[in-house]
Amino acid sequence: MKLKKYTLLLGLLLLFSCTATYNLQSSDSETIEIKASADSSALAIIAPYQKGIEAEMNEVLTYSKINLTKKGTESLLGNFVTDLCLNYADAHMCVMNNGGLRTIINKGPINRGKLYELMPFENELVVLELNKEDYLGLLEYICKRGGEPFSGINIAMDKEGNVLSNSWPVNFENNEKVKVITSDYLANGGDKMSFFQNKEQYKVGLKLRDAIIDHCTKTDTITATLDGRIKIIDNE
């Protein structure tokens, strides 16, 4: 059962299933309150589809061994999402942003609805290529922000957010470029990721949310670890 089939019906459900309250303001600033009751005939038509949506959203896809949170410079949730994305494209690394991950994943059963909460946006996965200057710009961005979700490389930074050392996934001296998988929102410069702008984007053909769902569907139990991919070095 495809969720796309229910999009229009879900919209109708939200429109008719609640008591709507409107405030109409006249030219003399007098406020007039109008209330419209739910249309019972419309609710009767939509009810079977509502049950179908609820059943699909409540379907348990996998189990999590631990709580996957966004806490820290390196986070369990960030590692989980960016690591799995590397399975869906030929890329050296993956970069996302903490703001795009809208909730945490608690230990225990994980249903489809929870993954929609985690990634409610229709963001597509894309791959783009960075030269050395833009790659260094990406590393600086991650460190100055105190960490953002990434996979495929290692970074050491100081307490002020300066890059101290990093891995080199390609040989830039041979004019090679780093392939990065990310969301189309970030690839277009979202969240101030200017180093991604004006780059050719290669579409993976999969939404970020669908990649997460696919991974969870194929994995009986999910987990993540903090592997030290980004470290804060105290130089004092």
Image: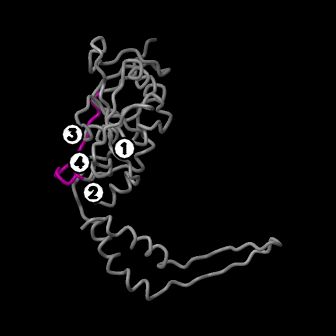
Q: Earlier in the sequence, mark 2 or mark 3?
A: 3
Residue that mark 3 sits on = 87
Q: Earlier in the sequence, mark 4 or mark 3?
A: 4
Between 218 and 5, the one nearer to me in the picture: 5
Residue range (magenta): 214-228
Residue that mark 4 sits on = 65
- Coloring scheme used: one colour
Is residue 218 inside the magenta stretch? yes
C-alpha distance separating marks 4 and 3: 21 Å
User: In the picture, which quadrant includes the N terminus?
Assistant: bottom left
Query: Residue type at mark 3?
Result: Asn
Query: Residue type at mark 1?
Result: Thr
C-alpha distance separating marks 1 and 4: 13 Å
Q: Earlier in the sequence, mark 4 or mark 2?
A: 4
Most extreme residue toward the right, as rendered?
28
C-alpha distance separating marks 4 and 2: 11 Å
Query: Residue type at mark 4?
Result: Lys
Is residue 42 inside the magenta stretch? no
Q: Residue at x 27, y 65 (%)?
A: 2
Residue that mark 2 sits on = 110
| Secondary structure beneath label 2 | strand
Residue 21 position in % (x across, y down): 61, 76
**Would you identify the image quadrant in which residue 229 lies?**
top left
Q: 10 Å neighbourhood of mark 3: few (<14), some, or many (≥20)?
A: few
Q: 10 Å neighbourhood of mark 1: few (<14), some, or many (≥20)?
A: some
Q: 10 Å neighbourhood of mark 4: few (<14), some, or many (≥20)?
A: some
C-alpha distance separating marks 1 and 2: 14 Å
Query: Residue type at mark 2?
Result: Ile
Residue that mark 1 sits on = 69
C-alpha distance separating marks 2 and 3: 21 Å
